[in-house]
Amino acid sequence: MTGQALAQRETTETGPGTSAPTVQVIEPARGWIGINWSEIWRYRELLYFLTWRDVKIRYKQTALGAAWAILQPVMTMIVFTIFFGRLAGLDKQTAVPYPIYVYVGLLLWTFFANSIANSGNSLVGSSNLITKVYFPRLIIPMATVGAGLVDLGISFLLIVPMMLFYKITLTWQVLLMPVVLAGTVLAAVGVGTLLSALTVAYRDFRYVVPFVVQLWMFISGVMYPTSMIGGKWRWVFFLNPMAGLIDGFRAAFLGVPLNLPTLLLSLAVSLALFLFGAAYFRRMERRFADII
Amino acid sequence: MSHPAIRVQNVSKQYQIGTGGQSYGTFREAIVEAAKAPFRRMKAGEVPGGRENSFWALKDVSFDVERGEVLGIIGRNGAGKSTLLKVLSRITEPTTGRLEVRGRVASLLEVGTGFHAELTGRENIFLNGAILGMSRAEIQRNFDQIVQFAEVEKFIDTPVKRYSSGMYLRLAFAVAAHLEPEILVVDEVLAVGDAAFQERCLGKMEEVSRAGRTVLFVSHNMPAVRSLCSRAVQLVGGKLVRDGNSHEVVDAYLRLEGEGEGAERVWADPDTAPGDDQIRLLALRALGPDGRPAGHAYTSQPLTVEMEFDLRFLHSALCVGFELQTADGILLWRTYHNDGPQDEWPVLKQGVNRIRCTIPPGWLNHGNFMICPRVSLHCIKWIIVQGGEIAFSMTTDHARSPLWASTAEDRPGILAPELQWLAE
């Protein structure tokens, strides 16, 4: 990024576990600041601990513990299967059985939706940390996404028996899974950090987000195949990164035809969201402790 | 060492207060402001319309801290001490100015940052340690010592919400106490907890300073600042007004902080003077043997407290007197004009009265004291119970023995009477 002014300049390392003396210069920053990746790397253990904390607390507080991570997509899948699949007749539109088609989409969607909703509130919820300790603030929304990944991992366990039940065989497309997942993580972190920074400055955002997330689900092809969207403006639909990513996720696991151009478009949008979200966050970061 | 551990250069911090401090507050407002923005020049970090609502928490603060130095930062509430620590800890950004920091900084601005009630003591140790900047290996290495220091071995696997407040504090402090940074920044964490806890905090801080680490210590506990810190700085209204030997800075601060402008206070305006319609305090003075106000007195001489007041009507239960307190707020005594037998009471009349009381020589030890006026109707109500204090300082010079050095401050205690000793 051009036009950088660094809030801190360091000549050698600081961070947890190091003892070498350094020169740290603290002065006011101006404008857009780059992401200090090396600093985030140095604080990686804190990222781990905050993720672990979020996961642990959530599971300690719910009676069902880890099973909760599975229940959300499963119950949604059941409801969708009955109402969208059977009653609305969408189950004739999908190449593979509707329940698993929906479930795979829901897995990825639930991860994204929960990540951005929780990220949005993460900074405001951690105001006690932000006003008392220093660490790169980007770690807070990142930890929320990390906790979402753990949930995704758990809900993923159900995929295996479902695939056996519906007799789905894996194709080479399963190699796409890491790519799609990476893209989704980028999109989640991007939107999450953007929302978290916006929520600190404008508290009414936290009321807007759940509503937006709900609508977003309907335009992402979760309960219907995206092949239903046709016409000249199809590519606009895929500017929503989750549309292309969910398709890619389905292609990876269910062997449905891969639509490469839309996947690439969604990946590009995810990357752009990530860069923009992180950049906006960094620009606002220096005022967090003052206005939170 | 050619380079100081910390160098603060002309650091200022401006805050927006009122609605400006909330940035835009809601997105709706932000949109409105954004629409107006092209017609107004905005500087980075400033909020439009907030210029009238800003104040400088720090203004042009500059000082150096050498490696291994223990620096005390004192000042009234709101002077900017915590803000300075926050800027040093990178929690908030200076508005102007620059800081250079050499060494890993650990900030203790609060005890138990990040503790979560649902997690066990063990889990919280790791979480809190990580938040404070310790690596997992470090925490693991110090784990047993931390548990031992906190004396919570039996409860280490119970959720922290079950802990008593004492256990909670001990555990939180134990984690922080095992930080090993080059620079430690501590903000009044001693203010919480019981006396035993405060003792351990101080003890640990002494250990840290003896180990050669640089320490910045913000506190209202003047004896602690005096004993722990070699040097101190005082902030007033965001500005650095004093920088020097900790004893001198603390003494100077206390003299002004006695809330008296020296040893005499006169209230010209009856409406603002302490008291009520029945009695108004006109003046309060601490006089030396020459009859003049004595801000610096000597223990070998009597000190006379004079109270001048306007009495509208007499009352049989009226008690007029004062409390003598140390500058730290310890109460020595409360005395009233009618403490003695009735026939020895000074006679009060309607109108202006001036009564005096003499503190004998050889009672008080060196230190800073406050005279706080107290007026009441015995068993009925208070008339003056706070405010109106004057201050004076005592220097010990009444010792008659060659072995009791009168100028050095080696004899502890608030009082220093010369008592009669006899052999059997």
Image (cartoon, rainbow, N blue to C red):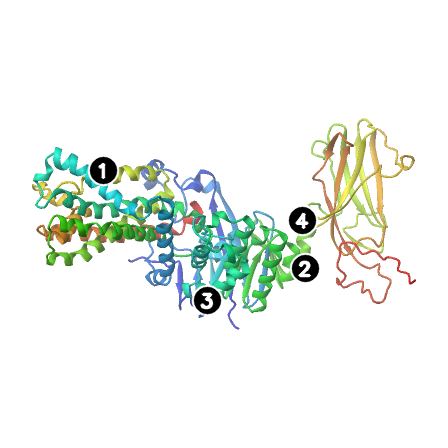
Of marks 2 and 3, the one in the foreground? 3
Placement of the N terminus of chain A among the 4 image quadrants: bottom left
- The answer to the question of whether label 4 and label 2 lie on touching residues, with beta carbons closer than 8 A, is no
In this view, the residue farthest toward the top is B313
Taking the image as shown, residue B126 lies to the left or right of residue B2, namely left
What's under tag 2, amino acid-wise?
A: Glu
* Residue A4 to residue A148: above or below: below
Check the residue under mark 1 and report the chain it is in: A
What's under tag 4, amino acid-wise?
A: Glu
Of marks 1 and 3, the one in the foreground? 3
Q: Which element carries disc 1, helix, strand or loop?
A: helix
Percent position of residue B351, x then y? 82, 29
* Residue B358 to residue B97: above or below: above
Tell me the quarter of the picture where residue A32 sits: bottom left
Residue B257's disc number: 4
What's under tag 3, amino acid-wise?
A: Arg
List the residue tagged with mark 2: B248
Taking the image as shown, residue A289 lies to the left or right of residue A216, namely right
Check the residue under mark 4 and report the chain it is in: B
Query: Which of the marked residues, 4 or 2, is nearer the chain's N terminus?
Result: 2
